[in-house]
Amino acid sequence: MKLVRYGAVGQEKPGLIDKSGQLRDLSAQVADLAGDAFAPASLAKLAAIDPASLPEVSGHPRIGSPVGGAPKFIAIGLNYADHAAEANMPIPAEPIVFMKASSSLCGPNDNVEKPRGSTKLDWEVELAIVIGTRAKYVSEADALNYVAGYAVCNDVSERAFQLERLGQWTKGKSHDTFGPLGPWLVTKDDIADVHGLGMWLDVNGKRCQTGSTATMIFNVPKIVSYLSEVMTLLPGDVITTGTPPGVGMGMKPPQFLNVGDVVTLGIDGLGEQKQTIVAA
Ligand code: ZN
């Protein structure tokens, strides 16, 4: 299933994309795509519905984050060896974990704000995991049972805030609109091999990032299991899992985003995003 939330900011309704690409409304079936709506039993109920029986949504409404009210927005850093190299940082022995404010989540095609004082606004195409079931101390072998599905995420980053202003990366990762997610939450049964997905990102139509989830250092079961040892994962938590090479910080000379720039990105089977940079 391809699950979506559509409509104005803060008033999104649940929906799904049928096999022909038509958006259909799920408001009569589920209040919102949030929290326990991602539990296996809830997803099974939605999967049992004949999409043709659902009302078609006309026009092209805004698409929001496919996850409403995410309890946590967790990120894995330096999870691709070649990205760690371009960032001049060692390949980590254990997953690097940092938090993004959950208020930074936004729709896949919403404008991205350049924060006041920002000089080093950067991009990161990433595979995001959405948790379906409360997870504490789960094994790698069991970890996928706690995953609802996957989505494209742009882990938008302000490098000066992240790296030059002391303390944790969170400062440079949490501004409003720093977490475009979607367009869809694709349930895990629809992704044959989550570790074989091509990923790409363009800035103003020029290819910057090309990668594959095949080169992740820590894979999805490892990440879910590892995180469940250091915190309890809750239904609706979003985990973005690191970026392949080609970020602006790693270019020679470095290249950063300015107002008016357009970022497009996508992952095989998970859809595409497009953001325009605007002043905060
Ligand atoms: Zn990242």
Image (spheres, rainbow, N blue to C red):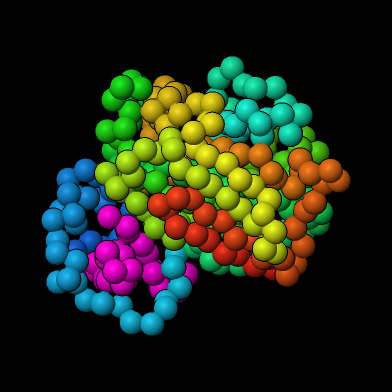
* Residue 40 vertical position relative to residue 167 in the rendered view, above or below: below
Residue drawn at point x = 29 percent, y = 48 percent: 190
Question: Horizontal and vertical percent for residue 227?
Answer: 45, 28
Nearer to us in this view, 42 or 175: 42
> Residue 165: in sight, yes or no?
no
On the rendered structure, is 251 left or right of 186?
right
Nearer to us in this view, 18 or 112: 18
On the rendered structure, is 168 left or right of 102?
right
Q: Quadrant of the C terminus?
A: bottom right
Q: Quadrant of the N terminus?
A: bottom left
Tell me which segment is drawn in magenta.
1-28
Nearer to us in this view, 251 or 11: 251
Residue at far right of view: 253
Residue drawn at point x = 39 percent, y = 69 percent: 6
> Is 223 in the magenta?
no
Residue drawn at point x = 36 percent, y = 62 percent: 4
Quadrant of residue 165 in the image? top right
> Residue 116: in sight, yes or no?
yes
Quadrant of residue 263 in the image? bottom right
On the rendered structure, is 274 left or right of 255?
left
> Is 24 in the magenta?
yes
On the rendered structure, is 58 left or right of 121?
left
Tally of numbered tags: 0
Residue drawn at point x = 82 percent, y = 46 percent: 254
Residue at far top of view: 93
* Residue 250 vertical position relative to residue 227 in the rendered view, above or below: below
Question: Horizontal and vertical percent for residue 97?
Answer: 56, 30
* Residue 17 vertical position relative to residue 165 in the rendered view, above or below: below
Question: Horizontal and vertical percent for residue 121?
Answer: 73, 53
